[in-house]
Image (spheres, grey):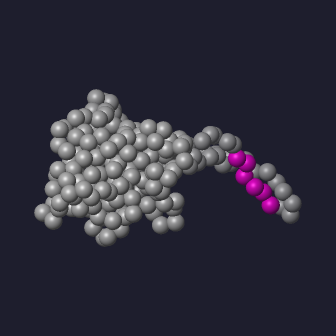
Amino acid sequence: MLRGFYTAAAGMVAQQRRQDVLSNNMANALTPGYKADQTTLRAFPELLIERMEANQIPVKNGLKVPTSELIGRLNTGVYMQETMPNFIQGPVKQTGMMTDLALSSGQVPDENGFLFFAVQNENGGTSYTRNGNFTVDAEGFLVSDQGYYVLDENGNQIQTNNDEFSVTQNGTIQTSNGATFSLGIVYHPNANELVKGANNLFEVQEGNEQPVNARNAAGVTFQVQQGFLEQSNVDTGQTMTEMMSTYRMFELNQRVLRAYDQNMEIAVNKIGQLG
């Protein structure tokens, strides 16, 4: 019976964690460039149950061993194994803001390959994002909506001085004073290796493959649209359906746990009661 407690509790924990992921997706349904997280549930290793018989088989030197009978396998519940972003292009929407940039993937040679803008994170390193909701700060630098410096293809900050600049489809920025910059657009052949951090940024784990300049990557094409934003790829209708299903599964495991608790109460307080 105690196994039932653990199995039902494991199911509740797994569904609670899945609900947290779905709620976060729904909360970011309007965040530009947001990539919805996907969860995978996995069963704990199964147990092989045998019944030890009272009959004993004699062996050498007068020793006897009990016989056993195979009953079957016992599953001990599920857990949430991992969370991975869904790298699918979100819909592109026109905003009319000249500092808004949408990065559209054209052709990529790898199944899991994906394109990103390069930005300078708060630690001075390079992070990657699909959120092109940029602006110009007080010092004239192009920054993200979180204040991170947008980088060019050489990893340098881009100073446009104002928002009167134009961007070509290949990501070349032409400022009003005649300066030009090549927007930092990188390509990673396996985006699933990236770690999703705070503020809609993606990081490269130490030891993993680094992204490369998308302009130098063979077979990679892209298009930058000025005055447009890539929207979140969260499907709100599907997410709401999954949230309801997850809640029902949590509630079902809760009922199972309550039933085990009632049975345990009867076993402790009534079975074997004197009088």
The secondary structure making up most of the magenta span is strand
Total labels: the figure holds 0
Q: Is residue 255 in view?
A: no
Horizontal and vertical percent for residue 79?
Answer: 44, 48
The residue at 27%/33% (across/down) is: 236
Q: Quadrant of residue 140?
A: bottom left
Of 217 and 46, which appears nearest the observer? 217
Residue 141 horizontal side relative to residue 182, left or right = left
- Tell me which segment is drawn in magenta: 63-68
Q: Quadrant of residue 240?
A: top left
The residue at 30%/56% (across/down) is: 180
In the rendered structure, does residue 64 fall within the stretch colored magenta? yes
Horizontal and vertical percent for residue 55?
Answer: 73, 47
The residue at 34%/54% (across/down) is: 183
Q: Residue furthest front?
A: 178
Q: Residue furthest bottom?
A: 123
Horizontal and vertical percent for residue 152?
Answer: 34, 59
Q: Is residue 228 in view?
A: yes
Residue 15 horizontal side relative to residue 191, left or right = left
Residue 233 horizontal side relative to residue 147, left or right = right
Q: Quadrant of residue 74?
A: top right
